[in-house]
Image: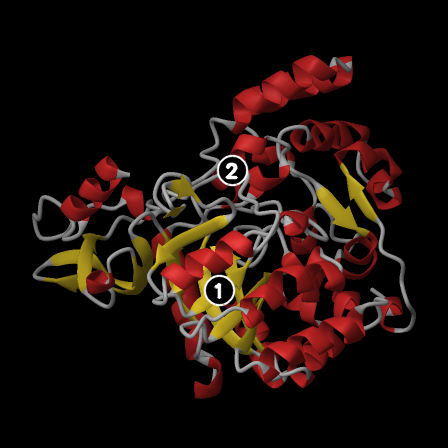
Amino acid sequence: MSDRAGQSHRRFRAYTNRDLDKIPQLSRLSADHRRSLKAVAAVLPFRVNNYVLDELIDWDRVPDDPMFQLTIPQPGMLAPDELARMRALVEAGERAAIVAAARELQRQLNPHPAGQLKLNVPSLDGARVKGVQHKYRETALFFPTPGQTCHSYCTYCFRWAQFVGVDELKFAAREADTLVRYLQRHPEVTDVLFTGGDPMVMRTRVLRRYVEPLLDAELPGLTSIRFGTKAPAYWPQRFTTDDDADDLMRLLELVQRRGKHVSVMAHFSHPRELEPAIARSAIRRLQGAGALVRCQAPLIRRVNDDAETWSRMWHTQVSLGAVPYYMFIARDTGPKEYFKVPLHRAYRIFRDAHASLSGLARTARGPSMSTTPGKIVIDGAAELAGEPVFALRFLQARRAAWTGRPFYAKLDERAAWFDELRPAFGEPAFFFEAELASMQRSA
């Protein structure tokens, strides 16, 4: 693969499900394979750009190439009967029937896992605060409307429901005033995370309209502003050669001058995303503007489900001055069956990758599950009192008192998500379940 992107001001071009026939590289696939891709893209969101196609995918390894698996719809993402049904509808070209069938399937795919709709959306003056989630005491998530898309979509994405055109499934806020008022009432919030979608798809002048109100308001509790983004991997030009890249750096510097810490939560899923010179330049540019770059990604079957890949990725991140932050377990939503990795195997991958690194690179936490009660990390797999168990712990929790408390689940080598685990040692329930049930009833 070339590094043409590092040598010129490349113009961004995105392809969606309507453009599959216009992607020249896909002509390498069989006609039957392309028909299946169209069927999947009618149900699950698809968007890819020219940088990903030209610089990140190794077309000589398709379809097994990890970046191809990460960004291009795969036939296995739908069950065989669902794929056959969608293929027939797409080939018949009946638009209304395609949309109706897609909506039916989408609602079966757990579009908002972990209590996002019922438990995470806060209220202000008796009304739900649109575009905000407040799950953990110190952190509020903010979803600005113009940022509810991405430069390219990851095929596993747990936020796929943001992108399928169903308004009732979206989190989005058109302005920041309500967020400011909410933060003024909740001084316990020290950290605002701009998320989506991807806030870095916004032009800097638009992003300013959401960031500057937080700086201008009297928010003594706010100490940190974070941006969750895949742009350093999928469109690093956003930080280097785009015509408003310099203005973006000035905005980040402004946040620093106003006394707020800036973190860029960069999603790097595979070490190949860090190979192009322009991706490394993007990281250096962000660091030069005072931002701390933290790196996180989920463990995805067919993309990065081996220890060597994570070891190489974390080592590269540290060499660039970035901080390995999280290895997540892919959430139980969307095409989860295609991408899931059993928890027992995930723990071994994390353990083996960690063991291969120096202490500087052992900052990553995981494997972590963002579940309804909170972020649960697998600390170990062992035998206690004659019973094989997972040792678990909350890194973050809906109730602060749960955070850090160890607990144990029966070791099930088939389980791929927390809901599939059962308490160890004959306990009837995990320690938090009664209180969580009470929260759910009152929501």
Query: Which residue appears at 83% of the width and 53% of the height?
Result: 50
Rendering quarter of residue 229: bottom right
Query: Which residue appears at 53% of the width and 43% of the height?
Result: 171
Q: Residue furthest right?
A: 8
Residue position marked by numbered label 1 in the rendering? 192
Query: Which residue appears at 28% of the width and 55% of the height?
Result: 398
Query: Which residue appears at 62% of the width and 60% of the height?
Result: 210
Identify which amino acid the numbered label 2 is placed on: Gly
Identify which amino acid the numbered label 1 is placed on: Val
Question: Residue 10 placed where, x, y %?
Answer: 89, 63
The answer to whether 228 appears left or right of 272 in the picture is left
Q: Residues within 10 Å of mark 1 (few under 14, many from 20)?
A: many
Whether residue 366 is situated above or below residue 16 in the rendered picture: below
Q: Is residue 279 visible?
A: no
* Label 2 residue SS: loop
Q: Residues within 10 Å of mark 2 (few under 14, many from 20)?
A: many
Residue position marked by numbered label 2 in the rendering? 334
* Camera-side residue of 201 and 114: 201
Q: Which mark is residue 168?
A: none
- For the N terminus, the image quarter is bottom right
| Marks 2 and 1, the one that precedes in the sequence | 1
* Camera-side residue of 85 and 240: 240
- For the C terminus, the image quarter is top left
Question: Residue 259 placed where, x, y %?
Answer: 53, 82
* Camera-side residue of 441 and 29: 441
How many numbered marks, from 0 up?
2
For the residues labelled 2 and 1, say whether their Cβ atoms are less than 8 Å apart: no
Question: Residue 412 placed where, x, y %?
Answer: 26, 48
* Camera-side residue of 342 and 113: 113
Whether residue 422 is situated above or below residue 109 in the rendered picture: below
Question: Residue 109 placed where, x, y %?
Answer: 48, 32
* Label 1 residue SS: strand
